[in-house]
Amino acid sequence: MKPYKNKINRIRTFALSLIFIGIVIMYVGIYFRSHPVVMVIFMLLGLIAIVGSTAVYAWIGLLSMKTVPVECPNCGRHTKMLGRVDMCMHCREPLTMDPALEGKEFDVNYNKKNSKL
């Protein structure tokens, strides 16, 4: 199982990967210079990926402004929490603001609305 990462950082990584994917798609379009229609299709697909990345960055920026900043008890640095449980952005310490989850094993399923305590 992959180690769990902070939600905000995962979304930012996805947005950054969309930029690189868009650039690679556009670069592939250069190989079709002799077929202008195909080249334009690849360029537009790359542009859509980059515009999608911009939208994701805007969305996570707005979402990040609504998060609760907390101080990590392990490293003492400030981090932002999304949901009932999350990880510290810096040291990956499990964090919760729900008193009912204090001392319980970290589980991502606690963030789902239908999860049982």
Image (cartoon, rainbow, N blue to C red):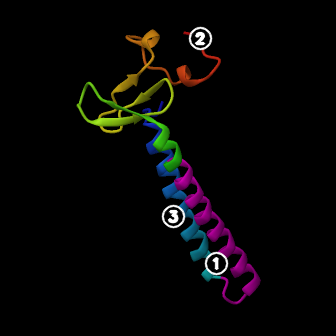
Residues under numbered marks 3 and 2 in contact, where contact means CB atoms less than 8 Å apart: no
Q: Position of residue 73 (x, y in %)?
A: 26, 24
Residues under numbered marks 1 and 2 in contact, where contact means CB atoms less than 8 Å apart: no
Q: Could you tell me what secondary structure mostly forms the magenta stretch?
A: helix
Give the quadrant of residue 18: bottom right
- Seen at 62% across and 59% down, the residue is 52
Q: Which residue is mark 3?
A: 20
Q: Amino acid at mark 3?
A: Phe
Q: Amino acid at mark 2?
A: Lys
The residue segment tinted magenta is: 32-60
Where 31 falls versus 88 (above or below)? below
As drawn, is 89 to the left or to the right of 24? left
Element type at marker 1? helix
Give the quadrant of residue 58: bottom right
Give the quadrant of residue 25: bottom right
Where 80 falls versus 17 (above or below)? above
Q: Amino acid at mark 1?
A: Gly
Q: Nearer the viewer, residue 82 or 93?
A: 82
